[in-house]
Image (cartoon, coloured by chain):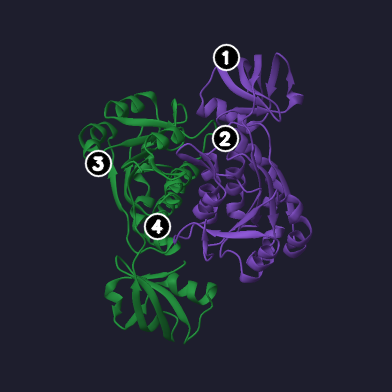
Chain colours: A purple, B green
Amino acid sequence: MNCILLPKSDMTLPDAQINDAAQITHINNVLKLQVGDTLKIGQLGGNLGTAVISSMSSDSIKLSGVQLDIAAPPKLDVTVVLALPRPKVLRRLIMDMTVLGVRDIVLINSYRTQKSYWQSPMLARLEAFVLEGLQQGVDTVAPQIQLRKRFKPFVEDELLSLMKPDAIVAHPYSEMSLTQYSQQNAISQASTAKAVLPSVVFIGSEGGWIDYEIELLAAQGCQAVHMGSRILRTEAAVNVLLGHWLLHQ
Amino acid sequence: MNCILLPKSDMTLPDAQINDAAQITHINNVLKLQVGDTLKIGQLGGNLGTAVISSMSSDSIKLSGVQLDIAAPPKLDVTVVLALPRPKVLRRLIMDMTVLGVRDIVLINSYRTQKSYWQSPMLARLEAFVLEGLQQGVDTVAPQIQLRKRFKPFVEDELLSLMKPDAIVAHPYSEMSLTQYSQQNAISQASTAKAVLPSVVFIGSEGGWIDYEIELLAAQGCQAVHMGSRILRTEAAVNVLLGHWLLHQ
């Protein structure tokens, strides 16, 4: 946790109270803070700032002098459509996308998504993974997450309204590279290029997309791009792909 | 596994034999291949190519018609110096760095590395993690991994000889951004910029580097860079940072 996020309901400015067990443990055992120390905090959905610890007990920490004067960093203006991954990696993927500042996430079914993944209890914990990501990434604004259990209706009926105007799908066996795509869409700025983030990015999970899925996407104008001959794990692909734009903001 | 890698000793061209249990399970249960099917293979340290399955038993798969005519992809010409992370994430970090094609890896002690990490049995399994990474990333050439249990002697006595000529350290609290650093070092190419990979990249683990470590590195000419206000997990930082150059190769 690089900041402690609190819901507005736990704040009565300039005071606030921490009731969450994980946050209290972190303050005690990792940050090793005491009464009088200053803490980096944020209001969920609001600003970032600092507070001073005024009292500590085993089940709550009271804060005073709360100052919330730093705006949350801008979101990546993108919808990531992610093939629902194994439950084990779902937490890290949601965390990483949150850390990177993705604005919208759609978890979608794909041919290679196992049906059992949709029954995973991890799907009930998305909000907790987002909170972890916000506190790691020092942000306060949660991404919007939607679930879509059917691929074809999403692509045919919903995708077009999200494309403003473009979409890409990460696919190691495509002919165009991400670099070529970025250069096509680059806005020249002196000797450097500022990449334009497509409004929608599809990322597969283990085993990627099948040809039928790539064809359905192509029919809607979604461009398949590869990232070189190296085939990345889903988590690595998410970070390489989205990090590419993070570094070009 | 996006290819099956075999040691030279298991090949008698144009035949070869798979004895590894994990590879046999993958061919049976994930790829679902049968006698007569073609398989993507590679020779450890050598070329990539294909082979045909000529017979299958529970403990070995025989291959014929082995063709190894595709060169392994180029390595990223970089030494990544990684603060030894929690054993739990070590496997994924070694895998990811291997997938991204890092040529040299140094696992180093840092102030925030817990002493117990150096006793982890995971450190004896680095070769297996590298093999996983090579088979994921479709590469045959393993990165060289070295362990350094003392930070200061490495920085003062060994670092300079690895810098050809530059080094960076990922540090969220530095003044220079990675983008600024890349632009300073960019080779102009029409309207786009080709980033130059520093020869050495230091990446911290949980909690990052302390000021003393950053100062020791700076004294040797190693530039601290941040990647924006967002603070990434170690795995995400590795992929964002190194993926940045992967996409600019």
Q: Nearer the viewer, mark 3 or mark 4?
A: 3
Could you say which disc has been placed on residue B162 in the image? 3
Q: Nearer the viewer, residue A220 or A112?
A: A220
Identity of the residue drawn at 57% across and 20% down: A39
User: Which chain does tag 1 point to?
Assistant: A
**CA distance for labels 3 and 1:** 46 Å
**CA distance for labels 1 and 4:** 45 Å
Secondary structure of the residue carrying numbered label 1: loop
Q: Position of residue A55 (x, y in %)?
A: 63, 15
Identity of the residue drawn at 29% across and 65% down: B45
Identity of the residue drawn at 67% across and 60% down: A221
Position of residue A12 in the picture relative to residue A117 (left or right): right
Quadrant of the rendered image containing residue A215: bottom right
Q: Amino acid at mark 4?
A: Phe
Q: Nearer the viewer, mark 1 or mark 2?
A: 2
Mark 1 surroundings: few (<14), some (14-19) or many (≥20) residues within 10 A = few
**CA distance for labels 2 and 3:** 32 Å
Instruction: Tell me the residue that label 1 is attached to.
Output: A35
Instruction: Tell me the residue that label 4 is attached to.
Output: B129
Q: Amino acid at mark 2?
A: Gly
Q: Are marks 1 and 4 on the same chain?
A: no
Secondary structure of the residue carrying numbered label 4: helix
